[in-house]
Amino acid sequence: MIDGRSVTVIDTPGFFDTRLDEEFIKSQIIKSIIECAPAVDAFVIVLKVERYTRQEMEILDKIVECCGENTFKHAVVLFTHGEELDGQTIEEFVKKSPKLQELVNKCGGRCHVIDNKHWNDCHLGYRSNKVHMKKLMETIDMMVQENGYYTNELMLNVEEDIQEEINSMDTINLSPEEKREAAKKIVYKKYLIRCAGVATGTLIGAFMGIGVAVVSVVALLRAAGIVTAAAAAGTVAVEAGVAAGAGLGAAAGTGIAAGVILGAAALAGAVGGGITGYKSTKEADSVLDAIKISAKVNYKNAKEVISKVEQLPSNVYKKIQ
């Protein structure tokens, strides 16, 4: 409850924190996408009031790089540890760092701060968390009024899958809320397998609205759906092969364009990669073996596709986006 209103907060992991395990980050990105579907009011980019190291500056660069311009239309920067401001306003603190100022500017100047120690007294005026949370909610309300809700094709696709699972539970005696939670768990497990070969950066880009990444991941998920009738081990092999065959995740995410070139041809290539992966992993002893073998077999083909994509004129990419 914030200022008398019920607010749902989806707490994502630090997507750009290199100290976290990559597979954990990928699983949490998928979970975040599912929780956010079909749309969200706002992205709150949470940072600390502190002296920024070189590593932290690189994180700021990654945020700017991986968030589509449309994402920033729906984003607010929120600083924690306001007690470290030492008498400055948050605006004065931001001005001292060109990178912080760039990020705040991209978010339309929307910037707020809360204190982790001293600001819980509601009578402190400017230095009161209650005051700042109220201002944050007012900023979000104004932003939604001006720019609408944030969504993209991936989120809408996820919502369709959730609704399909809910519809299949018609005969089960559960409340609507319980059915949705159960459906989200099923979709999460499916997506976790299907996105096994997708680079972390591609998943983040899809979540944050980077055009090519969104289309690529959606194409992968739909292609993977074609083979879901296969046996369990075979399904994993085919779906891992689809990911590698589409070029997703190969060469640190540069293959994302391969998954969207020429629509139907890309889908056929993805399924072809899946079949190759399936044939090569019949003798796999585990899901992990299936994924590794499939990716290795398809890697050479994926590299060739990526090489051809990179030779395309730049105007082709614009048409794709």
Image (spheres, rainbow, N blue to C red):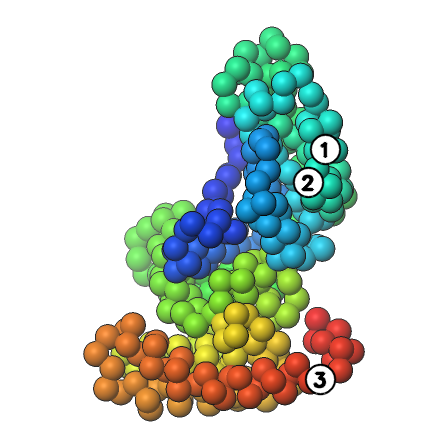
Query: Mark 2 or mark 3: which comes first in sequence?
Result: 2
In the visual, does 74 lie left or right of 286?
right
Q: Is residue 183 visible?
A: no
Cα separation, mark 2 vs mark 3, equals 35 Å
Which of discs 2 and 1 lies nearer the camera? The answer is 1
Q: Residue furthest top?
A: 123
Marks 2 and 1 close (CB-CB < 8 Å): yes
Q: Is residue 238 above or below residue 47?
A: below
The mark found on residue 297 in the picture is: none
| x, y percent for residue 21 | 39, 55
Query: Mark 3 or mark 1: which comes first in sequence?
Result: 1
- Please name the residue shown 42% across and 49% down the image: 19
Q: Which residue is mark 2?
A: 100
Amino acid under label 3? Leu
- Mark 3: few/some/many CA within 10 Å (<14, 14-19, 20+): few
- The answer to which image quadrant residue 101 occupies is top right
- Please name the residue shown 49% across and 43% down the image: 10
Q: Which residue is mark 1?
A: 96
- Mark 1: few/some/many CA within 10 Å (<14, 14-19, 20+): few
- The answer to which image quadrant residue 209 occupies is bottom right
- Please name the residue shown 52% across and 70% down the image: 252
| x, y percent for residue 217 | 53, 70
